[in-house]
Amino acid sequence: MAENSEKTDSRDEVEIVLKTVGPARPSRIKVPSSIKVQDLRNLIAKDGHLPVDHLKLILRGETLHDKKNGDDVQLQLKDGDSLIVAVKPKSPVKRNDGFDDDDDDDDLKFQIPESSSWWKKRLFSFLHDKLKLPCILLMAIFSMSQKAWVFIILWFILAPIAYRLDIGPLYILGTGFSIVFLNLGQRQHGELSAYSIFNEDFRELPGTLNADRLDRDIRTGQL
């Protein structure tokens, strides 16, 4: 029984090649064929005396991450797989003038909140990892409300119908006017309006610059 278990363990282990970025020569290490990225990172860091927090692993041209959509990433390694190992430089020391020297690119990357639903996380992973959409476009996509998405989908459904009825230009113009009117907002009671038809007694808005104000400022020496 002991011999069988040892044979099973040996079959489950594979030997992979580690190519460390730098002057170090390639090395070999035996690891389980099915292993989590986090466990693999810890084994490589322990074997090569490398900082595990700054270790970057690349397999088959893809950067390995410990988690994806909140779940641990599981790898299936083969005997002879080549793994590129890179040690990221440590962050520079913060200055005393109130400015940080952290990488600006990391701050500008859009990250979906952890409290988001599972389908949003899956969609974000597909758009970010597979389609490689820029962060600005991802921010615009995930910042829109469900009502806005309903209008957008409905617009694309009705667009071919408008094209077949030869009212495409009117459809586009109507869309533009609808966007303008829907974003006008609602004026509160007693709030002044810049438009004369909505401004009773044509009362002047605070901060309005006109000829009377200029003349008054010149006479009082405030200009």
Image (cartoon, helix red, strand yellow):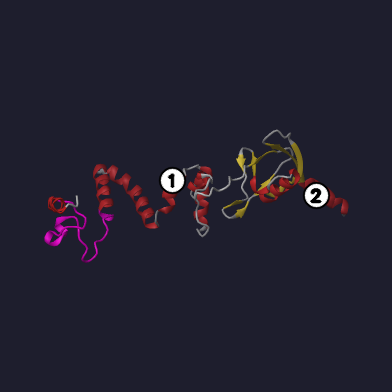
* Image x and y of residue 14, in percent: 76, 43
Q: Is residue 105 left or right of residue 84?
A: left
The answer to whether one can see residue 209 in this image is: yes
Say which amino acid is labelled 1: Ile
Say which mark, if any, is on residue 136.
1
Q: Identify the residue at the far bottom of this view.
A: 189
**What SS does tag 2 mark?**
helix
Q: Is residue 33 visible?
A: no
In front here: 139 or 147?
139
In this view of the protein, which residue sits in the foreground, 208 or 19?
Answer: 208
Q: Residue 217, percent across and down?
A: 16, 52
Give how far apart the Cα atoms at labels 1 and 2 are: 48 Å
Instruction: Say if the magenta span includes residue 201.
Output: yes
Task: Report the quarter where the N terminus lies.
Answer: bottom right
Q: Which mark is residue 80?
A: none
Number of callouts: 2
Residue at image position (85%, 51%) is 4
Q: Which residues are magenta?
A: 181-210
In front here: 204 or 130? 204
Q: Is residue 19 above or below residue 212?
A: above
Q: Which mark is residue 9?
A: 2
